[in-house]
Amino acid sequence: MAKLMEIMGHFPFEPDEKRPMLIRKEDYSTALYPPNNAFTSDNTFTLITTDTFMLGIYELGPGGVFAPLDIHPGDESYYILDGPVLQRSGNGQFAYLETGEGLWMPEGAWHCCHNFSDHKARILYFITPKAWSESIPPAVIPTEEETKFYKGPNNANLPDMREHIQDISRQGCTDDIGHFPVDPEGPRKTGAVYAVRDFEKLNNIHGTKHPMLMRFITSNDYGHFGEFILPAGGYGPRCSDPDSHKGDGALYCVEGPVTVNLTKLQESFVVEEGNCFFLPAGTEYQLVNFEGKPVKMIFAVTEL
Ligand SMILES: [Fe+2]
């Protein structure tokens, strides 16, 4: 498959060729990351990389970790497809994330991920606005030894994070959309990361006559990431109300299949589990459920 750095920003299309597109898992671009040392790599599947975001999946074998530490000039959010995993942050935070849980990492936070389980771990990630830049990652990358951890030799040189990590247990509300799990400005300076447990997701509803559950993992000025859960049953198939977004986005099918209906274009696509759909800015769409069970898609949208 193509080299990751060569497709960065233009897979599976050039930014000026964006169009609604079903992207099947067979078509994801595969790579070892980092590419120069399989001993410490994860198995990376790039779903989409364009000028507004990157969406991918990475796998870690049991006992595995990727090295060196990773960093981005944009925020990164996770949805854990197969956990648990332990996300290590350079500032000394360790987030233990179970299947279905989420994570928000602000731009500039050093991180890597460990798999202490007995099976392969899989993580869906969304990075926006940029995953890579000329200066990030920098030429010199800290080693794990230089990060903060139990009896770490460098601990005294790194900031005490306790006062920088907010409690996110307050009941969420509609006004939290755009500010979840916390306002991003502070964490983008301190590197504070937030695990978002299943019960901590920011719940809301899209549509009153045809309600669809929305469960945000993250929502801020860089992007929005979470779950759409469309129940089964109705007169005809169950459909969500049409919606469109100001920014580019993607839908990843976790429990399906889900039909994505482009209401204005009158074209529809069946998105099977593990496949995804690219939604260019402004595309009007609805989700359609023909199954006898609720279906679930992860949404990754740069501007609602
Ligand atoms: Fe990363």
Image (spheres, helix red, strand yellow):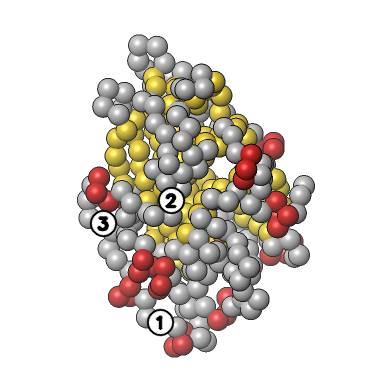
Is 10 placed left or right of 36 in the picture?
Answer: left
- Residue 206 rendering spot, x and y as whole percentages: 32, 33
The residue beneath circle 1 is 159
Extreme front residue here? 16
Q: Tell me which amino acid carries mark 1.
A: Pro
| Mark 3 closeness class: few <14, some 14–19, many ≥20 residues within 10 Å | few
97 w.r.t. 160: above or below: above
Name which of mark 1 and mark 2 comes first in the sequence. Answer: 1
| Mark 1 closeness class: few <14, some 14–19, many ≥20 residues within 10 Å | few
204 w.r.t. 288: above or below: below
The residue beneath circle 2 is 223
Task: Give the camera-side residue of 155 and 133.
Answer: 133
Name which of mark 3 and mark 2 comes first in the sequence. Answer: 3
- Residue 98 rendering spot, x and y as whole percentages: 45, 51
The residue beneath circle 3 is 169
- Could you tell me which residue is drawn at 58 percent across and 51 percent down? 51
- Toward which corner of the image does residue 234 lie, by quadrant? top left
Query: How far, Cα to Cα, is label 1 from label 3?
Result: 24 Å
Local secondary structure at mark 2: loop
Front: mark 3 or 2: 2
